[in-house]
Image (cartoon, rainbow, N blue to C red):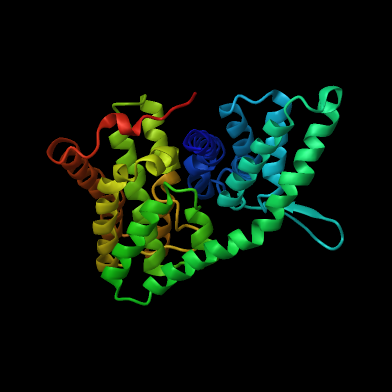
């Protein structure tokens, strides 16, 4: 069971990286230059379309981890797409794709589909090519679609809990929200999804961004010695790369959680703001700092605050806490952050 869970999480992590990093890297920056260079809008649209293909890619990546056949792997990807909630069908039959779907449900549907295709195995014989994709879509795929509303409601409960924190005084609220989002970004739960569902805004959104930033920068620093430079940097765009390692050994996130708590408190002090659609991105594509500057204005003071809270302090605090947990407490080691691509 542990091996199954590990492979599934690895597939989910890799799928998230492949689909979300392109937009995270260039999305907010392109929005700034498109008014002057309109042809970049095509690039932005391409990155958004790829994000909506996340369910398919997660299913395929998970199938690869389980060494399924090409037909089985594609069948899992299709089932995950059906159970993701990324599409809607209007009364006139128009099909629209929007967002990335519900990540938890994508994982559940993928797991059901993997178990289903493994059960079928070679039982279909000459009918495998014709029947396996259809059966996988119609059985585990539709089961995933059926449980989707319940999974969404569960996510909403989490969101309501976070919304309650916004009623507290800013410093404590900021610290708690940042801490929660620093954990959510390395879990199967979508920080973007939670933030948009509860319409998290103002200081709450700013604190959420700093929490995500703390995990991204921290995981980048902590994983550098065990991974190549490109993989380490990719953590800034999506700390979910460490989802498998975190769920297997939660204590590896302690340095980042402490960093996030401090940054979140400072979000309340300096009134770092954001919107429901920027919360959850952190430093990826510079969405967090750019949205803050867009709200408060590009004055020298706000630029210095942005650079300090989104870049300077996350680096310094994470370096301090990572060293403390590695050398003093000996609770974590660099190998704990190794990303397995196999």
Q: Quadrant of residue 325?
A: top left
Disc count in the image?
0
Residue 79 coordinates in the image, percent (x, y) = 71, 42
Q: Is residue 154 left or right of residue 90?
A: left
Q: Is residue 313 above or below residue 201?
A: above
Q: Is residue 239 above or below residue 281?
A: above
Residue 16 coordinates in the image, percent (x, y) = 53, 40
* Closer to the camera in the image, 255 or 69: 69
Q: Residue at x 68, y 23 (%)?
A: 69
Does residue 195 appear in the picture of this structure? yes
Does residue 53 appear in the picture of this structure? no
Residue 249 coordinates in the image, percent (x, y) = 34, 41
Q: Residue at x 68, y 30 (%)?
A: 73
Q: Residue at x 65, y 26 (%)?
A: 68
Residue 90 coordinates in the image, percent (x, y) = 80, 61
Q: Quadrant of residue 302?
A: bottom left
Q: Residue at x 25, y 33 (%)?
A: 333
* Closer to the camera in the image, 259 or 128: 128
Q: Is residue 250 above or below residue 291?
A: above
* Closer to the camera in the image, 9 or 94: 9
Q: Quadrant of residue 197?
A: bottom right
Q: Residue furthest left?
A: 328
Q: Is residue 73 left or right of residue 220?
A: right
């Amino acid at each position: 069971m542990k091996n199954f869970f590990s492979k599934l999480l690895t597939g989910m992590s890799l799928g998230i990286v492949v689909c979300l990093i392109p937009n995270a890297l260039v999305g907010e920056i392109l929005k700034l230059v498109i008014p002057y260079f309109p042809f970049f809008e095509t690039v932005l649209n391409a990155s958004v379309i790829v994000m909506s293909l996340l369910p398919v890619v997660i299913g395929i990546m998970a199938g690869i981890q389980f060494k399924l056949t090409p037909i089985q792997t594609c069948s899992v990807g299709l089932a995950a797409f059906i159970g993701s909630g990324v599409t809607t069908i209007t009364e006139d039959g128009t099909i629209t794709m929007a967002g990335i779907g519900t990540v938890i449900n994508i994982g559940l549907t993928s797991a059901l589909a993997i178990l289903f295709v493994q059960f079928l195995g070679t039982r279909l014989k000459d009918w495998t090519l014709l029947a396996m994709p259809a059966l996988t879509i119609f059985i585990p795929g539709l089961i995933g679609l059926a449980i989707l509303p319940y999974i969404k409601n569960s996510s909403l409960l989490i969101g309501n809990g976070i919304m309650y924190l916004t009623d507290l005084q800013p410093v404590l609220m900021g610290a708690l929200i940042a801490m929660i989002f620093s954990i959510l970004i390395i879990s199967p739960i979508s920080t973007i999804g939670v933030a948009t569902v509860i319409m998290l805004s103002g200081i709450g959104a700013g604190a959420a961004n700093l929490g995500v930033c703390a995990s991204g920068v921290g995981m980048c620093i902590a994983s550098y010695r065990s991974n190549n430079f490109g993989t380490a940097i990719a953590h800034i765009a999506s700390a979910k790369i460490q989802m498998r390692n975190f769920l297997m050994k939660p204590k590896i996130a302690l340095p980042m959680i402490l960093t996030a708590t401090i940054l979140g408190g400072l979000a309340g002090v300096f009134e770092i703001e954001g919107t429901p659609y920027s919360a959850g991105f952190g430093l990826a594509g510079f969405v967090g700092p750019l949205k803050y500057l867009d709200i408060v204005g590009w004055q020298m003071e706000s630029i210095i605050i942005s650079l300090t809270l989104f870049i300077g302090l996350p680096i310094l605090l994470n370096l301090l806490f990572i060293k403390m947990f590695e050398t003093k407490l000996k609770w974590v080691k660099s190998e704990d952050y190794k990303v397995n691509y196999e």
